[in-house]
Amino acid sequence: MTTTTAAAPLPRQIPYIIGNEACERFSFYGMRNILVQFLITSLLLQEVTTPGREAEAKDIMHSFMIGVYFFPLLGGWLADRFFGKYHTILWFSLVYCAGHACLALFEGSRGGFFLGLGLIALGAGGIKPLVASFMGDQFDQSNKHRARMVFDAFYWIINFGSLLASLLIPLALKNLGPAWAFGIPGILMLAATLVFWLGRKRYVRVPLPPKDPHSFANVVRTALLAHAPGQGGAGLMLAACAVLLALACFGLIGKLGIVACLCLALVVLLAGVGGATWWQLERARALHPDAAVDGVRSVLRVLVVFALTTPFFSLFDQKASTWVLQGQQMVMPQWFSASQMQALNPALVMLLIPFNNLVLYPLLRKAGYEPTALRRMTAGIAFSGVAWVVVGALQVAMDGGDAISIAWQILPYALLTFGEVLVSATGLEFAYSQAPPAMKGVVMSFWNLTTTVGNLWVLLSNAAVRNDTVTSQISATGLSEAAFLMFFFAAFAFVAALAFGGYARRYRMVDNYRLA
């Protein structure tokens, strides 16, 4: 066996993980991409008047996405502290399968259908931070140079599953009915679970770390509670205020709903406690080694990067809601569904990933510009803003009475997808490489939490435009609510790109791949 780093073989267990991901992504995108369309036309929202049904369906979809990307916190914590990644993935996958079964069996029952959505959110969210992290565990210092290629292949296969689902499942909904349209993704999820189980004897299973008195949580606790001569407890007061503000968020349940309030409370808590910890972190050096304290500071710096990507995800996930609703008002062939336009996204991803790696990035390097991970992510956020400028322009033309072909959506889909490849595909490997060894699952779950927060911004903006004062101000601009929100989210992305680029210039990369 060759021992040189350059010739280090690809781990033989990787195909099982990638095969699992392909089937799982087909199941997830298959049901998600028809969710808004199904809710609008089904009897589940029959008590909602027709004008409000689209907004209600959109809120349900984004609330579901908040759940999907919130439960990674639970999955990451259970994997890192109790069961390990393999067993956590396997058991949550079975919950996932049960959720799909509920959608197929109870497509006419509000309680049964929403139970299914809850189980899918729990199952999909529980495994989401772990599959990519588990794949990263299969690499060490001897073959880590292959990890980037495999992470790109991993993201490519995600989009292969999404492509097939986006093309086929809307047709299944139209021609076979909702039971089959939701049942087929369930069958694929069962196949995903079986493929993952078949590789059980080949996987590298990184053992759970022993209880560490210098763990992330212990260092944070010390930083917040330790007294320092001549210094006050301003950081602890900030953390306490964050807790009170988080509790106060639940007073908005009547306006925002329980899901949005939970998410908002979590954001406030993380921001307050994280800021307070950064403020007083040096106090922890009295009880903890420098490596542990520096590790906590490193994680906090990573979380700032994650926070600055949340505007991108608020734009990206609306292609399954806002863009579908826009597409339904456009001119299209009778056999075509607006939901099928989403197939463009994964198809373009599958083309752009090899194009970037084989053509674009080498050309940039040849020109003397290194496309680092953070530079790519900065550009990706900006491209998403450009996509929404185009979508907003299309909406303005439609509001003016022009008949617009749905083919015009190809341009914003292409721009948004280019941004996605630069942000999401890059972010997976960035999150894994920057996470300390004992916190791989949790840090990857925080990466997934960026999508939860992105969907929170959507719910908050939707709630804001239901206010009469805001609505009247939007009317004064001469734009429809839909067009105004599109330009608002474009501006949101541009501001985020500027902030991200400024922070990225000061960020210092680390290497946290395990030793051979």
Image (cartoon, rainbow, N blue to C red):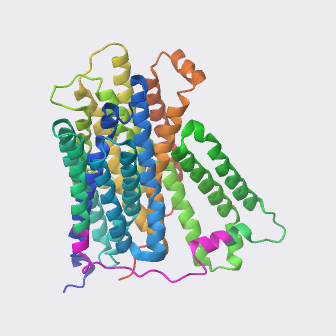
Q: Which residues are magenta?
A: 195-221
- Residue 120, above or below 218: above
The one nearer the camera, 515 or 61, is 61
Instruction: For residue 10, say whether it is visible.
Output: no
392 with respect to 181 (left or right): right
In the displayed orientation, state which residue is furthest to the top. 401
Q: How many marks?
A: 0
Instruction: Please indicate whether residue 473 sits to the left or right of residue 345 in the image.
Output: right
Task: Work out which residue is located at the far right of the displayed protein and give it.
Answer: 230
Please tell me whether residue 214 belongs to the stretch shown in magenta.
yes
Q: Main secondary structure of the magenta part?
A: loop
Which picture quadrant has residue 386?
Answer: top left
Q: Is 385 situated above or below 194?
A: above
State the image quarter where residue 44 is shown: top left
Give the residue at x 21% y 62%.
191
Asked if one can make out residue 334 in the rendered structure from this viewpoint, the answer is: yes
Which of 299/378 is in front?
299
Q: x and y percent of residue 36 in the render?
A: 34, 37
Screen quadrant of the C terminus:
bottom left
At horizontal 45% and vertical 51% (from top left) the residue drawn is 67
Residue 293 position, x and y percent, is: 61, 73
Residue 358 x %, y %: 22, 55
Depicted 240 relative to depicted 341: above or below: below
Assess whether residue 170 is covered by the magenta stretch: no
Q: In the picture provided, is 270 more to the left or to the right than 139?
A: right
Q: Please tell me which residue is depicted at 44% across the width and 34% down the height of the picture.
A: 490
Q: Residue at x 57, y 46 (%)?
A: 261
The N terminus sits in image quarter:
bottom left
Query: Residue 35: horizontal and vertical position, in percent?
Result: 32, 41
